[in-house]
Image (cartoon, rainbow, N blue to C red):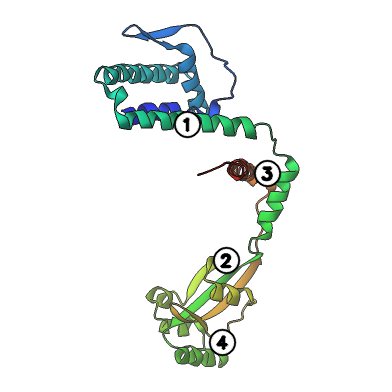
Amino acid sequence: MLKRALWLMLGTLSVLTMSSAYAEDKATKVNGVAIPQARINLRVKVALAQGQADTPALRNAIREEMINVEAMSQEAVKLGLSTDADVVQQLEMAKQSVLAGAYIQNTTSKKTISEDQIKQEYERVNSTLDKKEYNVRLILVATEAEAKTIISQLGKNEPFEKLAQKSKDANLAVRGGALGWVRPSGFVPALGSAIQKLSKGSYTNEPVQTQYGWNIIKADDERAVIPPALAEVRPQLLQRLQQQAIQKVIADLRAKTKVE
C-alpha cells in the first residue's frame, strides 16, 4: 500500500508546471485530517495527462482512492511505520524523484523544439532506413560443398523452388524457400549485404556463410521502400527529440557535478 501511495506522488512529475485550473478551497476530511481539493485536482491532472477523460466518475474514483490512501497513511503513522528506516528512505527517494522531475520539467520547458529540428530528425532517420525491400527465397544447407552444388544446378535452370526442398530448414523446404517481402537490415550483416546486391530474378553466385550454415538466396522481386510521411511520424519524432533534450540536461548537469 505504501508503494501505491508513493506512486501517486511520483505520478505528479509530468504535470508539475500545469495551471491550477481546478483549484478550489474545499477539502475532504478523513478522521479530521483535510485532503485539500487542490491535491485531488493535481491527481486529476495526472489522469488527464495520461489520456483519461475528465468525467465526474473519474473525479469521484480519484477522491475515493485518495481517501483510502489517507486512511492507510494515518494507520501507518499510528503503528510507528513513519519512523521505520526503510519507509523513511523510500519517502526521501520519492521526494527526490519529484524534485528531479520538477527540475527536468522546468529546464526543458524553456527549450521549444522547432519544426526544423523535427524535419531534420525525420530526414536523419529516413537516411538510415532500407531503400529497397525484396521478395526472396532462401536455401540453407550444412556445408559449402552442398551449397555450391545447388548453385551449379541453378545454373542449369533447375527451379529454385524444387532445389529448396534440400534445405535443412524444414519450413523453408516446404515453402520452396519463400521468405516473402523482407528488408536487408532485418538479417545478419552477411545475408543483408548479399540481398542488397540482388536484382529481380537473380540469385547469389557464391554461397553465403552464417552461423546457421550456408545460404543461397534468390530475389523474386524488389520494390522501393516508401517512408512514412512526416505528419504520420511527427509525434514519435517529437517524443524522441524531447527524450534527447532530457538526456542532454542530465548529461550537462552531471558534467558539472562533483561526485566523491
> Residue 9, percent across and down?
44, 26
Residue 76 appears in the rendering? yes
- Circle 4 packing at 10 Å, graded few (<14), some (14-19), many (20+), is some
Q: Is residue 84 above or below residue 198?
A: above
N-term mark: 3 or 2: 2
Figure check: 169 above or below 32 = below
Of tags 3 and 2, which is closer to the observer? 2
Three-letter code, disc 2: Ser
- Residue 177 is tagged as none
Q: Secondary structure at mark 3?
A: helix
Instruction: Determine which residue is flagged by label 3.
Output: 231
Number of other residues with Cα within 10 Å of mark 2, as a class: few under 14, some 14 to 19, many 20 or more: some
Residue under circle 2? 185
The type of residue carrying mark 3 is: Ala
Q: Nearer the viewer, residue 129 or 105?
A: 105
| Residue 254: image location, x then y, percent | 58, 43
The residue singled out by tag 4 in the image is 206
Q: Which residue is mark 1?
A: 96
Of pointers 4 and 3, the one earlier in the residue sequence = 4
